[in-house]
Amino acid sequence: MSANPMKAGAGVLGCLLGGVSRLAIAGLGIVIHGITVIIAYKFAGLLSAIVSIFFPVLAQAYWVYKIWAISGVFLNWYTIMIIVYLGLWVIFFFACALASSAD
Protein backbone atom coordinates (compact mmCIF):
# COMPACT_ATOMS: atom_id res chain seq x y z
CA MET A 1 0.00 0.00 0.00
CA SER A 2 1.29 3.39 -0.94
CA ALA A 3 0.73 6.48 1.20
CA ASN A 4 -0.75 9.51 -0.46
CA PRO A 5 2.06 12.13 -0.58
CA MET A 6 -0.46 15.01 -0.49
CA LYS A 7 -1.92 13.76 2.77
CA ALA A 8 1.53 13.21 4.26
CA GLY A 9 2.54 16.75 3.29
CA ALA A 10 -0.61 18.16 4.84
CA GLY A 11 0.13 16.30 8.07
CA VAL A 12 3.68 17.67 8.25
CA LEU A 13 2.50 21.19 7.45
CA GLY A 14 -0.27 20.94 10.03
CA CYS A 15 2.13 19.72 12.72
CA LEU A 16 4.67 22.41 11.90
CA LEU A 17 2.08 25.18 11.80
CA GLY A 18 0.44 23.87 14.96
CA GLY A 19 3.71 23.72 16.86
CA VAL A 20 4.85 27.20 15.86
CA SER A 21 1.45 28.74 16.55
CA ARG A 22 1.27 27.00 19.94
CA LEU A 23 4.63 28.50 20.93
CA ALA A 24 3.44 31.94 19.82
CA ILE A 25 0.18 31.46 21.75
CA ALA A 26 2.08 30.60 24.93
CA GLY A 27 4.49 33.52 24.63
CA LEU A 28 1.91 36.12 23.68
CA GLY A 29 -0.50 34.79 26.31
CA ILE A 30 2.05 35.37 29.06
CA VAL A 31 2.80 38.87 27.77
CA ILE A 32 -0.90 39.78 27.50
CA HIS A 33 -1.64 38.42 30.97
CA GLY A 34 1.21 40.43 32.49
CA ILE A 35 0.14 43.61 30.71
CA THR A 36 -3.48 43.05 31.78
CA VAL A 37 -2.44 42.82 35.43
CA ILE A 38 -0.32 45.99 35.09
CA ILE A 39 -3.20 47.86 33.43
CA ALA A 40 -5.60 46.72 36.15
CA TYR A 41 -3.19 47.85 38.88
CA LYS A 42 -2.52 51.25 37.30
CA PHE A 43 -6.16 52.01 36.52
CA ALA A 44 -7.99 50.45 39.48
CA GLY A 45 -5.53 49.35 42.15
CA LEU A 46 -4.33 46.19 43.85
CA LEU A 47 -7.69 44.44 44.20
CA SER A 48 -8.36 44.71 40.45
CA ALA A 49 -4.88 43.38 39.72
CA ILE A 50 -5.49 40.38 41.98
CA VAL A 51 -8.86 39.68 40.34
CA SER A 52 -7.18 39.99 36.92
CA ILE A 53 -4.59 37.40 37.93
CA PHE A 54 -7.24 34.80 38.79
CA PHE A 55 -9.72 35.56 35.96
CA PRO A 56 -7.53 36.40 32.96
CA VAL A 57 -10.03 36.00 30.10
CA LEU A 58 -12.73 38.02 31.85
CA ALA A 59 -10.19 40.64 32.86
CA GLN A 60 -8.87 40.96 29.32
CA ALA A 61 -12.37 41.38 27.89
CA TYR A 62 -13.16 43.97 30.57
CA TRP A 63 -9.98 45.98 30.01
CA VAL A 64 -10.34 45.88 26.22
CA TYR A 65 -13.77 47.44 26.65
CA LYS A 66 -12.60 49.87 29.34
CA ILE A 67 -9.59 51.10 27.35
CA TRP A 68 -11.78 51.44 24.26
CA ALA A 69 -14.36 53.45 26.25
CA ILE A 70 -11.73 55.71 27.81
CA SER A 71 -9.64 56.35 24.70
CA GLY A 72 -12.35 56.15 22.07
CA VAL A 73 -9.97 54.12 19.91
CA PHE A 74 -10.69 50.43 19.40
CA LEU A 75 -7.49 49.49 17.58
CA ASN A 76 -4.91 50.38 20.20
CA TRP A 77 -1.81 48.32 21.03
CA TYR A 78 -3.63 46.25 23.67
CA THR A 79 -6.62 45.29 21.52
CA ILE A 80 -4.34 44.54 18.57
CA MET A 81 -2.41 42.08 20.76
CA ILE A 82 -5.70 40.42 21.79
CA ILE A 83 -6.83 40.19 18.14
CA VAL A 84 -3.48 38.66 17.11
CA TYR A 85 -3.77 36.22 20.02
CA LEU A 86 -7.25 35.12 18.91
CA GLY A 87 -5.99 34.80 15.34
CA LEU A 88 -3.20 32.52 16.54
CA TRP A 89 -5.81 30.26 18.15
CA VAL A 90 -7.68 30.08 14.82
CA ILE A 91 -4.43 29.14 13.06
CA PHE A 92 -3.70 26.53 15.73
CA PHE A 93 -7.10 24.84 15.38
CA PHE A 94 -6.81 24.93 11.59
CA ALA A 95 -3.37 23.32 11.85
CA CYS A 96 -4.70 20.61 14.16
CA ALA A 97 -7.49 19.85 11.70
CA LEU A 98 -4.96 19.78 8.86
CA ALA A 99 -2.65 17.43 10.76
CA SER A 100 -5.45 15.07 11.73
CA SER A 101 -6.81 14.95 8.17
CA ALA A 102 -3.56 13.29 7.09
CA ASP A 103 -4.40 10.13 9.06
Image (spheres, rainbow, N blue to C red):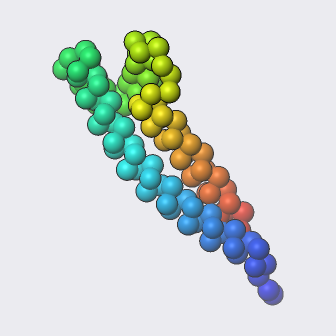
Q: Is residue 41 left or right of residue 80?
A: left
In the rendered image, which quarter contains the C terminus?
bottom right
Q: Residue furthest left?
A: 46
Q: What residue is drawn where x is 49% and y is 41%?
A: 85
Residue 77, percent from left and from top: 42, 32
How many numbered marks have been drawn onto this rendered protein structure?
0
Q: Quadrant of the N terminus?
A: bottom right
Describe residue 59's horizontal placement relative to residue 11 as left or right: left
Residue 102 percent location from the top left of the image: 71, 68
> Residue placed at 74% from the left, 72% from the top?
7
Q: Is residue 60 above or below residue 28?
A: above
Q: Report the side of 16 relative to 56 (left or right).
A: right
Answer above or below: position of 14 versus 35: below
Residue 63 can be seen, yes or no: yes
Residue at the image point whose x is 65% and y is 52% from the top = 94
Q: Quadrant of residue 18?
A: bottom right
Q: Residue at x 49, y 60 (%)?
A: 20
Looking at the image, the residue that sits furthest to the bottom is 1
Q: Nearer the viewer, residue 7 or 74?
A: 74
Quadrant of the rendered image containing residue 32: top left
Q: Can you say whether 22 is above or below 1 in the image?
A: above
Asked if one can make out residue 65 in the rendered structure from this viewpoint, the answer is: no
